[in-house]
Amino acid sequence: MEHNDFEKIVESIIDLPTLPQVVTTLINTINDPYSDASMINKIVEHDPALAARILKLVNSSFYSLSKPVNSIQQAVVILGFNTIRSLAISASVFNAFTANKFSYEGFWIQSLACAFMMDVLAKNSTVLDQEATFTVGLLHSIGKIIIEQYATERFDDILDVGHRNRLSFLDAEQQVLNTSYTNLGFWLAEKWSLSETIQQSILFQNNIADAPASIAPIAAATQFSFKFCRYKGCENGSDFDTPEPPAQELWDMLQIPADATDTVVGKLETCIQTAQGALDSLS
């Protein structure tokens, strides 16, 4: 094992993809409590590709609107600021990275499914930050792509160990590297100037006990969504252990009312199909 795998991988990253200026401007504007739909419209209209994706999403069967929407400003009002921000980040990340060693489509469907699941959990929990959940779900495994692209041989070793020993990516990774995909995901979120909540949620998703108290619930939701996603058969080819449902302690940390559990589970089960449709909107 190398002396410091994290430093070696980071030092090898010469051409790190960055978020487009229009996306960073959009994020900053949406984060401003005084912004409105007209301000968002002025930013989006300078990026025809993003504008097209927004219109494609709002007119998709997922929203089932009675009349087509042709105005970005109207789409912003219908979708909401959080969805617009998440779509912009999703499209940028989708175009920035491609997976070669495992299922590219599977990776993004799983990531988007986790993002939608996080959204469902946030809307039914009193302890989750709704502004951060979608982005955390989307980027929770982005560190795997960094290893795959910038430390290809080590990534091959991880998959080989995982396949031979029927291990999860996390467990196989611990036998090959002295760093983690969560450390690299945290690093990337920091480089992209995403919020500290997003950074730390990615970092602590597999180590909730050590997370700051304010981060523990969203870190738990991240792990919950990933486990639920895999348990329902949404895989990307990097995990080789037998999927198990989320533990009860994760449910408990989310503080979802008992009488809402069945409804929440039903909504979570639709997220994989929703992710497939969203992937079509991003491609």
Image (cartoon, rainbow, N blue to C red):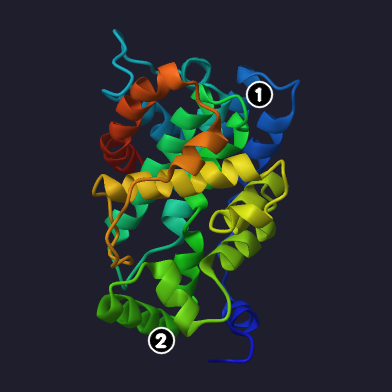
SS at circle 2: helix
The image shows residue 242, relative to residue 111, as above or below, that is: below
Residue 183 in percent (x, y) is at 61, 66
Of circles 1 and 2, the one toward us is: 2
Q: Nearer the viewer, residue 262 or 108?
A: 262
The image shows residue 16, relative to residue 267, as above or below, that is: below
How many marks overall? 2
Q: Counting other residues with Cα less than 10 Å from the Cα at mark 2, is it few (<14), some (14-19), or many (20 or more)?
A: few
Task: Find the residue positioned furthest to the top.
Answer: 66
Query: Which residue is painted at 49% across and 70% down in the image?
Result: 146
Query: Which residue is painted at 34% across and 29% down in the image?
Result: 265
Q: Is residue 261 left or right of residue 257?
A: left
Residue pointed to by mark 1: 39
Q: Of marks 1 and 2, which one's residue comes earlier in the chain? A: 1
- Find out whether the residues at labels 1 and 2 contact each other: C-beta distance under 8 Å: no
The image shows residue 184, relative to residue 33, as above or below, that is: below
The image shows residue 153, relative to residue 32, as above or below, that is: below
Residue 275 in percent (x, y) is at 32, 39
Residue pointed to by mark 2: 153
Q: Is residue 283 in view from this perspective?
A: no
Q: Nearer the viewer, residue 96 or 119?
A: 119
Distance from disc 1 to disc 2, alpha carbons, whole Å, reads 46 Å
Q: Nearer the viewer, residue 54 or 71?
A: 54
Please name the amino acid that badge 2 sits on.
Glu
Which disc number belongs to residue 176?
none
Query: Which residue is painted at 64% across and 64% down in the image?
Result: 187
Please name the amino acid that badge 1 sits on.
Met
Residue 158 falls in image quadrant: bottom left
Q: Counting other residues with Cα less than 10 Å from the Cα at mark 1, is it few (<14), some (14-19), or many (20 or more)?
A: some
